Amino acid sequence: MMKVFETKDLRNVGIIGGPGAGKTSVAEALLFNAGATKRMGRVNAGSSLFDFEPEEIRGKLSINSTIASFPWKKQKFNLIDTPGFLDFLTDTKNCIRAIDGVIMVLSSLSELKVEVEKVWQYAEESKTPLIAFINKMDRERADFFKTLEDLEKKLRRKFTPVQLPIGAAESFRGIIDLIQLKALVYESNASGKYQQGEIPSEMTAEVENYRDKMAEAIAETDDELLEKYLEAEELKGKELDPYLRQAVLSRKIIPVCCGSAEKNIGMVPLLEAIINLLPSPLDRDAVLGKKPSTNEVKERRPDPQESFSALVFKTIVDPYAGRLSLFRVYSGELNSDSNLFNSSKQVKERIGQIFQLVGKQQEAMNPAVTGDIAAVTKLRATSTGDTLSDEEDPIIFDPLTFPPAAISFAIKPKGKGDEEKITTSLAKLQEEDPTLKLRREQQTKEIILSGVGQRHLEVTTERLKRKFGVEVELKTPKVPYQETTRSRAKAQGKYKKQSGGRGQYGDAWTEIEPLPRGQGFEFVNKITGGAMPRQYIPAVEKGIREAMSEGILAGYPVVDLRVTLYDGSFHEVDSSDMAFKIAGALSFKKGFSQADPVLLEPIMSMEICVPDEYMGDVIGDLNSRRGKVIGIEPKEGNQIIKAMVPMVEVLRYEPDLRSMTQGKGIATMKLSCYEELPPHLSEKIFAASKTKEK
């Protein structure tokens, strides 16, 4: 069992960035240099402690956030390696709620990707102190200064290098510490060992330039220090340390470090930067919440003497071991084998053993102190986003937020009888991943799975197969068209069958007329003078309703009609409920065909958030999809395009929007109404329906 660390000695750090920047490699190298692992895991070799799920090993990318807790230099690190791929950034956003500082990993080889802008925004919104780390300085085309320039241009903030690389690509061999003005030259065997020496003479001018820029940036954050700097006094390294730390904690300065995770260069200085520059839980502000009964605003300070409070920021579901809940303690402490209160759901929970995680391994710990991150198993009612607290002094923190579904597929089981298993298995996956949505489309009878992106849903189906043995196909959902009419018509439906013995006889006259959109179905009885006995009228209505559900034109349900039964005839012996049910259906089908029938298509109300430069392309694309732009609103450098678009045109819109906007566009949509389908498109539906019938 790991020793208990005081709150001041905790460092909760998230590794964030875009795909391909080497986030997981940085996390592996930090663990190795802290002595937490004996061998540095490799993503490409499938030996990473962080990317251990089969889908991650196969795709060589992080799909889940993974935590590793370890000690180093009298501090305890809770290091969370987060996903960088767009479809999985909600997990990253949730984890940022649980940490105190961020390492944003950037590749020195390529321009900033849209994912970096998104995770940067998450850190900005949560006011989380941050260190930028420019990785892969050993690779061909590595360019520290170009990456730095791109960083400032795209994120519109000033970044301050506190390290410079010695060389680049094949010649990269170490870093310059601009605080201490020392060169750290590394061995070439990825051991992480280095010699401290003097700055190479060819770098003297460059180092002096960036040292002055750094000192000036630090001085500008404190009036007293600025006065001293302006008096031309040299600011020594130790003198700058406390001011730099305070500037980073207040987010006035974003320091930039560099190195190579793969070559194990710059990792120990990065560990030291985490300790020296990023906050402990004590450096963070009190967390605000509400009292459950009154919604009165309450706060929890990072104090072990305060009442216990924690937020569950992630859930892991194992088909054999059950549910594992990961939580961040904001105040007080929690002991194993105790009780606590889920204030979000107003239920009591029993706590067994408390664990810390190192990848997929669980290590017992006790207690979980203020500021720590821990896990417990088999909580009965608790899910991601819930607040845990003392029952006598409850509090509810703001819940986690999840993006609306961006893409949907119909899922079809490959095995017979697996429909029910699909539902129960996906419900368990939803506990892990609340961005998944599942519903049954009543009209088409399809099970619809919705998620953040296509890759997201593909990974979900892989997990379904691996964890629960359920294989499914993803298919484009059927469009729930409807049928209706545009004019009135009258028709007779007569069913007469006589073949010896008792016959069948039913005769019904009905009038069909359209109703306004969304009015549904109305049945009116105007039978007078005993044209048919009253007991047969419900049978006529039932026959009409069944015919409407099956559709007339192309098999889609009929809506927005009034059907009036106004006449008929009967036979004293041969009439029956069945005969009048058939007569009602025959009358309806004949009248519907004569009442100028049309197909209706579902129309989606869409809001598309795009940067200004992509607005023209997106609007042009919407027009090509038969869409109607009904408004545009500016919002923080973006434009919100509001449009009405036929559902059939946007079933696969999410990947197209990403392609048009380089991943920067976000669309939400919901069903708005139904409108007439243009005749040339209706003909295609009719033709497809006839082919299917054959």
Image: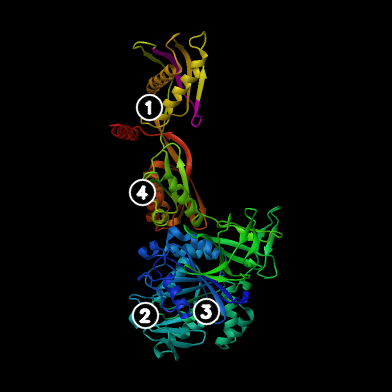
- Contact between marks 4 and 1 (CB within 8 A): the answer is no
Q: Which residue is mark 4?
A: 473
The quarter in which the N terminus is drawn is: bottom right
> Is tag 4's residue or tag 3's residue first in the polypeptide sequence?
3
Whole-percent x and y of residue 485? Answer: 42, 26
Earlier along the polypeptide chain: callout 4 or callout 1?
Answer: 4
Side (left or right) of 367 relative to 679: right
Q: Quadrant of the C terminus?
A: top left
Tag 2's secondary structure? loop
Q: Is residue 606 visible?
A: no
Label 3: few (<14), some or many (≥20) within 10 Å? some
Q: Amino acid at mark 1?
A: Ile
Q: Nearer the viewer, residue 462 or 625?
A: 462
461 lies above or below 308? above
Q: Is residue 295 above or below residue 567?
A: below
Element type at marker 1?
loop
Which residue range is magenta in the image?
503-521
Tell me the distance, in whole angstroms, between the alpha carbons under discs 1 and 3: 72 Å
Is the residue under label 4 in contact with that under label 2 (CB below 8 Å)? no
- Residue closest to the eye, 441 or 465: 465
Q: In front: mark 2 or mark 4?
A: 4
Q: Nearer the viewer, mark 4 or mark 1?
A: 4
Is 507 within the magenta? Answer: yes
Nearest-to-viewer mark from 1 and 3: 1
Pointers 3 and 2 in contact (C-beta within 8 Å):
no
User: Residue 508: image x %, image y %?
Assistant: 44, 15
* Circle on res. 552: 1
Magenta region, mostly helix, strand or loop? strand
**Could you tell me residue 355's position as x and y percent?**
55, 68
